[in-house]
Amino acid sequence: MKRKLVVIGNGMAGMRTVEELLKIAPEKYDITVFGEEPYGNYNRIMLSPVLTGEKTIKEIMINDINWYEENDITLHAGAEKTVVEIDRRNKKVVTKDGTEASYDRLLLATGSNPFIIPLPGHDLKGVTAFRDIGDVDTMLAAAKEKKNAVIIGAGLLGLEAANGLMAQGMDVVVIHDIDVLMNRQLDQPAAKLLLSSLQERGLTFKMAAATKEIHGNDKGNVVAVSFEDGDKLPADLVVMAVGVRPNIALAEKAGLQCNRGALVDDTMQTFDPCIYAVGECIEHRGNTFGLVAPLFEQAKVCANHLAEFGIAKYFNSATATKLKVTGIDLFSAGDFISDEHSEDIVFQDPHSGVYKKVVIEDNKIRGAVLYGDTMDGSWYFQMMKDGTDVSEIRDRLLFGQAHLGNSGTEGASAVANLPDHAEICGCNGVYKGDIVKAIAADNLFTLDDVRDATKASASCGSCTGLVEQLISETLGGDYNESEKRKSICRCTEYSHDEIRAVIPEENLKTIHAVTEFLKFSNPDGCHVCRPAINYYLLAQWPGEYKDDSRSRFTNERMHANIQKDNTYSVVPRMWGGLTTPKELRAIADAAEKYNVPTVKVTGGQRIDLLGVKKEDLPKIWKDLNDAGMVSGHAYGKSLRTVKTCVGSKHCRF
């Protein structure tokens, strides 16, 4: 007779434990799962691409409702099925609507709760966290109708939320309480490069700022955010992304031993031998957890003991972080903060936007930060986890595994030299050996085949390059990468060339017509495909297609260049450097009227107004337009500077 396993929590950690258990002991338990959200198990770390429009909710589902039925798992999903009591004496759980389920073993996987700063106004409509599908729905609804978003917190989630809302057309300001972005993952030089990249994309930042109050109107909707320095920002949406706290209310109520999280031993067992716990709700050897890789390791250990094999133990493992913002390459692992016991090996090229730092202690890698070039991140991370002695390769360490020559690779590819236990996909805990084995056993020949079989590269996509290298290395000549076509973005399977071709063929004359005809997963497109389609339409239908300003990059939309201090520079057009007293007066009047701190004659024979506030841009351009001046070509990816002679009328040469 099967024993009864009840799982409280339908998230990634709990369901990964169930998946691992089904692999090794599929007939041992009747399994019942309780989840607060009315969905199957989805990939929470992929909410950012959903917000940007690069993925749909369906695409981030790990296990849909059918999976539970196929595996004879009873799923109770929805707010009314939230477990409110664990009756340890009678070994049963009770939900909000009175549903009861008895257990022989109980798995606690309640995750964590977003921390909401208890500021005045934190409970207004329009103030949200960024934690689940409901939060994403709230943010997307606001983006359709509202304009101004304020993000409190510039960590991983805060920046991903900001990027997503900007992609949806909102004006976004990110607030951070110190002057270093992602200070838990980056040091100051890397954070500075990241700040510059995000500002170029159109994000605005207010750093080292203390939020004082969130203001609302008489309808209870948020309208502004004020700060201790007296500044005030308009806000239709406020997203708090300032961290999470382990959700231990149920564990505490049940009398389980808790500190910051529910305490577990190396077998993931709590104080009660019938109750196990995994994920963000636990505390193990003084540590709590927020990244997916250690959660999946815990799941394997827990499944081993639920199956009563009794041999696995969990030890706190090193973690690595990547930012899920398309076009930004960032990698951080281990302890990258220097101290008296460590040495730093650093490569920095600010002009190219590349920064590499490897922290070494006792000839072993203790941590690493990579920005702009993250190709060797997995290699550094694996050496860090393995405790590899790097004394003989220190002088070539920053140049990557490909430059080791006879000291390591003997000319082989980087991925070929990774051990089988090297983690390739951190999102789904897939190792090199898993992929190689699946390719050989299941006759896999394409990236999509490997994704379907192993889930590697199926989430954030940052490991796609490694997976492709691994397929190529394993299959040799049977893998032809050139046969693949690269889609324009994740909204569609079609490439740039295919989209360009279909516009005249089908007489498509709007962005919506293109996305509808090609059945984009996101009908509005995203920040990647919209500018491209907008350009193709302009090129195909000159004079007929009306430029969609929302689909231009921020500098082009604003007719101004964003600067490092989040102000803008305005450059009126001067044909060949020629101007008039009227135009000069208009420029001078605008500079005084809008308190422009710097006025500079440029190398391109124009006058640049630097330090213009974003909110003043429409007004300053109106004044300049009224004087007959238009914007110079100073913002797009175009020819920027042409030197001219004064002309034959005055020049004697």
Image (spheres, rainbow, N blue to C red):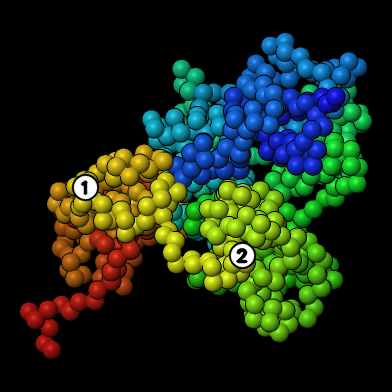
Direction from residue 302 to residue 462 in the image, left or right:
left
Residue occupying the point 70% across, 71% down: 417
Q: In the picture, which quadrant includes the C terminus?
A: bottom left
Q: Position of residue 211 (x, y in %)?
A: 59, 37
Q: Which percent across, then down, holds residue 404?
A: 68, 80
Q: Secondary structure at mark 1?
A: loop
**Would residue 639 appear left or right of 367 to someone viewing this image?**
left
Residue 185 is at least partly visible in this image: no
| Label at residue 249 | none
Regarding mark 2 in the picture, which secondary structure is present there?
helix
Task: State whether residue 319 is above or below residue 41.
Answer: below
Q: Which residue is mark 1?
A: 506
> Which sits earlier in the primary sequence, circle 1 or circle 2?
2
> Residue 470's mark?
2
At 73% from the left and 71% from the top, the residue drawn is 344
Residue 615: % across, % down: 37, 43
At 73% from the left and 16% from the top, the residue drawn is: 95
Mark yes or no: residue 408 visible: yes
Q: What residue type is disc 1 on? A: Glu
* Residue found 66% across the figure and 70% down from its top: 416
Q: Tag 2: residue type? A: Leu
Front one among 114 and 432: 432
